Image (tube, rainbow, N blue to C red):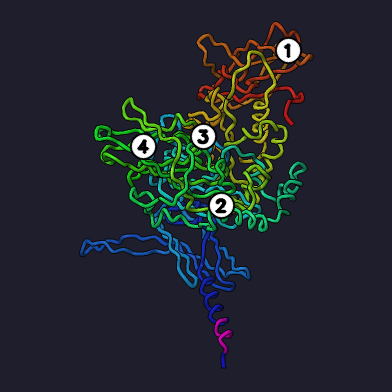
Amino acid sequence: MYTKRFLLAILLLALTIGVNANVKLPRIFSSNMVLQQGIDIPVWGWADSGEEISVMLTKTVVRMNENTNEGEKLTIMTASAKAIADESGKWIVKLPAQEYGGPFTLRIKGKNTITFDNVMIGEVWVCSGQSNMEWPLINAKNGENEVAAANYPNIRLFTVSKRVSQFPQEDLTDGEWVECTPETARLFSAVGYFFGRSLLEELDVPIGLIHTSWGGTVAETWTSPETIKNDPDFREPMVELQQMDVEAYKKEKEAKVRKLLGGELPTEDKGMQNGKALWSDPDMNDSDWSKIKAPGLWEEQGYLDIDGIAWYRKELDLIEEQTQTNLNLHLGKIDDADITFINGIEIGKTNAYDEERVYTIDKKYLKPGKNMIVVRVNDTGGGGGIWGDPKDQYVAIGQEKIDISGDWKFKISKAVVQAIDLGPNSYPTLLFNGMINPIVPYGIKGAIWYQGESNADRAKQYQRIFPNMIKDWRTHWNQGDFPFLFVQLANYMKPTQKPAESAWAELREAQTLTLDLSNTGMASAIDIGEANDIHPRNKQDVGERLALNAFKVAYNKDIVYTGPTYESVEFKDGKAYITFTNTGDGLAVKDKYGYVKAFAIAGADKVFHWAKAEIINPTTVVVQSYAVKDPVAVRFGWADNPDDLNLYNLEELPANPFRTDDWPGITK
């Protein structure tokens, strides 16, 4: 006779089997995705150990009946493959290479069936780096018009959420593929978007863009543990990271947060249910909510160690006259993302921690008396909340300003307690673990990369870690030496009056040296930077120059894809004769008098002087200075901001900064 305990065990076993039986795929797979053309397509996931998995790629076509002139829909199998889940439940198949086209349906069948629709076969590129890659389209030059025109259903976008991780993760926390529309492109990487648009216009095939970047990050955090463990500068920090007792630390922090929040640790946002913003209701009872000062990060007001989602509510009292015109709501800055409501109506949203929020409130949403401003804030890491200067937080009614800084009602609806309070640069490998490993080995054509600002003070080291990172990614993807294209740092900071050493110039040199790796390309931004802003708004030229590199490196087009590049120097009769490659139809100077600028020359004393330079034939520039009788070294564009650089090829691509000497620099 079965005992109750035995029956309970049988029931629990059955429930466990039921939970584990479902086939699951990584989040990088979804409807609207692009699968890479011309390669065996990896599809992988998890299931029960020993479970057989069938993967099918199908296409629906319409066959016309000649007699009735009516269409009949037929489903055609274009590719299929099977796999058996291993002991750990993992499985992977590779579908045979496909030609461009779509839409297709991808169906994965085990004990359950998963179906992804509107799937295209095209060109897939990973877009990664730091803030200049993260920079959203809306904030690019002419951003509003660019967003309005971003209607390209054959460009598909995927954004990887920011995440640090102690160890390599197998899956992302969220994310899905979407078609490129003004709404979906608005906050997408501007560089990635302009690159993809150029590819679409030239190739006329579906384009998939996977955006995975984080502002202010260093290259070593994007590199895997397998590579970092062999680096003399980062081996010890990586070992320290991996030996941390994360779970014990997390439990201790969770206990503190529970106490802070009255015993509760909310894991789901109760304010937003099934897409409805319940806590934006102006009439809801918020009498039990706390008060918080805004602007001011919530960590600064006692809510330590909490990331996640919080809601802010503020009453706005208006008289009849004030409701007869549209208002402008100035919230200041919000870390990281917000959705803002007035009287329960969404009026704007932004995903950028350092951008001023200014939203227009249509007068039709206003009423005399009490109006309710509600802000839902999503903090993904670090500081969280409404922040900035109190003078930037007000409602503008014509020339009148109503101050809304000060006390707001406040409630945390979802608390995320990180295991360790880590920033993305706290240790190496953190972003590879959390934001790259989960998308490997998704089939790609290549990667574009805009990063280096955060490594500039260690430019000499970058000569090693950057190419090692590229080789590391190629090893993990196991797709050979796929194209890896990167942006050389833009000109930035105050120009110098005399030739000087420069960490940024050394970083650019490290990037140039990385071109020794096969299938790499570099897009110069040396002429489109801004002295007072590390984020130049001209992302159009950056994306288009990356695309030129792609056409040459990835698609073998016979084009001029980069600017004049230093090849050799000959010193003769007190002059330096510089020979360039990549001159296209010839060297050109953007100066009506023909003066070539940004050159400096030095003798054996290693003291550089500005030099006179001129083009003497389509590939050669001669450089001299009356202050240097016997020159031994030449530098071009060697500065944080060589703002007068004006040497190009006739295809209007700028010459690449360089030096002919190998004298010790200023970086480690």
Image vertical order of residue 113 relative to residue 351, above or below: below
Q: Earlier in the sequence, mark 1 or mark 4?
A: 4
Which image quarter: residue 12?
bottom right
Q: Find disc 3 in the rendering and name its residue.
A: 548
Q: Residues within 10 Å of mark 4 (few under 14, many from 20)?
A: few
Camera-side mark, 1 or 3: 3
Q: Residues within 10 Å of mark 3 (few under 14, many from 20)?
A: many
Camera-side mark, 3 or 4: 4
Q: Earlier in the sequence, mark 3 or mark 2?
A: 2
Q: Secondary structure at mark 2?
A: helix
**Extreme-top residue of the structure:** 626
Whether residue 478 can be seen here: no
- Magenta part of the protein: which range? 3-8
Image vertical order of residue 102 relative to residue 403, above or below: below
Q: Which mark is residue 260?
A: 2
The three-letter amino acid code for the residue at tag 4 is: Ala
Q: Find disc 1 in the rendering and name its residue.
A: 572
Q: Is the C-beta separation of discs 2 and 4 under 8 Å?
A: no
Camera-side mark, 2 or 4: 2
Q: Position of residue 437 (x, y in %)?
A: 60, 52
Q: Residue at x 61, y 41 (%)?
A: 519
Q: Secondary structure at mark 1?
A: strand
Q: Is residue 524 left or right of residue 373?
A: right
The three-letter amino acid code for the residue at tag 2 is: Leu
Q: Secondary structure at mark 3?
A: helix
The three-letter amino acid code for the residue at tag 1 is: Lys
Q: Find disc 4 in the rendering and name its residue.
A: 149
